[in-house]
Image (tube, helix red, strand yellow):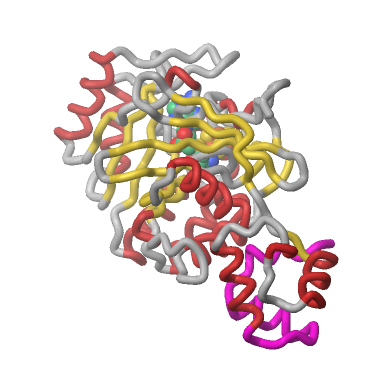
Amino acid sequence: MLTDIKSMNLDELTTYLTDHGFEKFRAKQVLNWIKQDAVSFEQMTNIPAALREFLTENAYLALANIVRVQRSKIDDTEKFLFGLSDGEYVEGVLMRYHHGLSVCISTQVGCKMGCTFCATGKSGFSRSLTASEMIAQIRSAELHAGERISNVVLMGMGEPFDNYDNVIRFLKLVSSEDSLHIGMRHITISTCGIVPRMRDFADLQLQCGLSVSLHAPDDEARSRTMPVNRRYPIAEVIAASEYYVKKTNRRISFEYALISGENDSDDHARRLAALLSGMLCHVNLIPVNTVTGSGYRKSTIKRQNAFVNILSAAGVNATVRRTLGSDIDASCGQLKRNFMKGDV
Ligand code: SAH
Ligand code: SF4
């Protein structure tokens, strides 16, 4: 198997090269080429031919090439289809805010969790992404935009905590000077609630944001749309969320997709308020985005407002998230491996 050197930090690359008989300082040179977006080892002209040959034979440079771009006519959001080294595809989204560019990246090709409202969940699962493939998505988006990316959200395809080790490796690498140097404070992870990994993550006490996809205030309703709830029920998810807040002193976010007639009644809002009251948290309400075959509809504006008001009155911070890129299916839950003929 070829070695994924773009997932390594400077220390690891140094060990790898010295273990194979090359000088220590070569690692820094190779890293500099990676930072300059080298796509092949042959390009690395200041390292000896023997090292170039060794790397060509034993290692690879992970890529996430943009093979298709769709641009929203409403808000300039762009959706990318990234081609990975082994022929798989994932999607990512570039969003333009007043405070800068934000990119939403994928952590897996597909997802195993099967949430009924999510297009990714319906597309099945193929494999997890490496740290280098997560970084490559950001870098490709950055080069495409011609401007630095300031914020990253792990809210594309896949469940980050079902790919925990690679995601943690990604966070440490991307925030370091060896890589893109994007501070953890500018990165947010979204999880469907894999409780043991939420606790592991809290123990790391990273400055990275955490968002938990809740989408229902009780086990019966949540299990109906999110099969993961049968494994990790709400009480455990809430306890792990409280643990995260205690460990990190950071506010936690909850995502709640408002689905007409499913989870958007006053009673749901009151039960959600009871569940979260007193916690250092924020609720992001997302009018559910349409996904082919799901049959779900967005809650009315009136329902959305009533829901926010009930939460606010109970002292629970809540806002309705603005939908971006709706005309290009770039909104939450709409990403899939929809590579089409003629895309390249
Ligand atoms: N797997 C992770 C992160 C990717 S999904 C997670 O589930 O948290 C990113 C967010 O989009 C999650 O909050 C997810 O619940 C939400 N989402 C999925 N499908 C959606 C849809 N059709 N409408 C609105 N939000 C959706
Ligand atoms: Fe997976 Fe998240 Fe979609 Fe659920 S919402 S199927 S966890 S990507």
Find residue 106 and report its horizontal and vertical position in percent: 56, 43
Residue at the spot x=82%, y=70% of the render?
A: 53
The single residue placed furthest to the left in the displayed view is 313
Compared across the picture, whether 236 is left or right of 5 comes to left
Find residue 158 and report its horizontal and vertical position in percent: 59, 41
Residue 220 visible in this rendered orientation of the protein:
no
Residue 320 figure quarter: top left
Q: Nearer the viewer, residue 245 or 152?
A: 152
Residue at the spot x=32%, y=41% of the render?
A: 275
Compared across the picture, whether 319 is left or right of 209 comes to left
**Is 14 inside the magenta-drawn segment?**
yes
Please state the extent of the stretch shown in magenta in the rendering: 1-25
217 above or below 17?
above
The single residue placed furthest to the front in the displayed view is 45
Which quadrant is the C terminus positioned in? top right
Residue 266 visible in this rendered orientation of the protein:
yes
